[in-house]
Image (cartoon, helix red, strand yellow):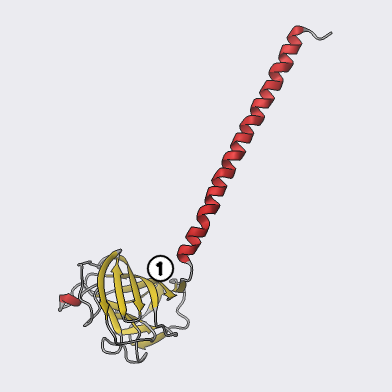
Amino acid sequence: MIQKGQTMKATQKHGGVMMKRCSILVIVLGLLVVSFGALQHAPVASAQEAGWVTLFDGSKLEGWNRVGNANWRLADGAVQADSGSGFLVSPASYGDFQMRVEVWVDADANSGVFIRCADPQKIGAATCYEVNVYDKRPGPEYRTGGIVDVAKVMAKVDAGGKWNTLEITAQGPKLQVTTNGIKTAEAEHRGHVRGPFALQYGSGVVKFRKVQIRPL
């Protein structure tokens, strides 16, 4: 005969097992909800990066063409120069595109990104669009963030002493430059249509650690 106390113990044991199973089920359901939410957001993040191609990630310079005598070298995840004068020129040409460039300069540096260059051996403001990184430019209207002789700076952003992100959009005659999230130049100019781009070393200390482009 089963005693009353034994019945109560069995009931309590069964109840405890059921509570543990319910707790485990709740945890599993919670994890599934979190995982489902992550999966929902994953395609958005991928879509935001869709089409972007990394041309330089700080690790190698194969394929880039050197023009001039700047002492470009790889160090600490970036390419840098501090003497001479010259450019790193992309092997491919681009027409309509967006690009992102991460650049570090000291306070006295003269650098920039030249786009749609007509002659890859003769880089300059006359043969390309020159997006400037030059805080102390004698003509301040085309200082850092401006497009030399095309679009004067809309907002003053100093680049010296820190990493900066240039975002450049060229679509037909429409040109736009954003420096560290601030729109610094905008213009509609019918000039250079297509060509390689070039990273400049002019003076001071200049470093580039990432270059990405997305054709439009």
Secondary structure category for the residue under label 1? loop
Q: Residue at x 36, y 78 (%)?
A: 171
- Total label count? 1
Residue 208 in picture, x, y percent from top left: 36, 73
Residue closer to the observer: 120 or 186: 186
Q: Residues within 10 Å of mark 1 (few under 14, many from 20)?
A: few
Closest to the observer: 162 or 10?
Answer: 10
Image quarter in which the C terminus is found: bottom left
Can residue 113 be seen in the rendering of this structure?
no
Residue 1: % across, % down: 84, 8
Q: Is residue 133 left or right of residue 62?
A: left
Identity of the residue furthest to the right in this view: 1
Q: Can residue 165 be spotted in the picture?
A: yes
Q: Amino acid at mark 1?
A: Asp
Left or right? Give the position of 48 relative to 165. Answer: right
Front residue (pair 78, 111):
111
Q: What residue is rendered at 68% in x and 21% in y?
A: 15
Dividing the picture into quarters, in which one does residue 189 lie?
Answer: bottom left
Q: Residue at x 30, y 69 (%)?
A: 178
Q: Position of residue 204 (x, y in %)?
A: 25, 75
- Residue 16 placed where, x, y %? 66, 23
Quadrant in which residue 179 is drawn: bottom left
Of residue 72 and residue 27, the one placed in the foreground of this image is 27
Task: Give the labeled residue for mark 1.
Answer: 76
Residue at image coords 57%, 39%: 30
Q: Is residue 99 above or below residue 93?
A: above
Q: Is residue 62 above or below residue 211?
A: below
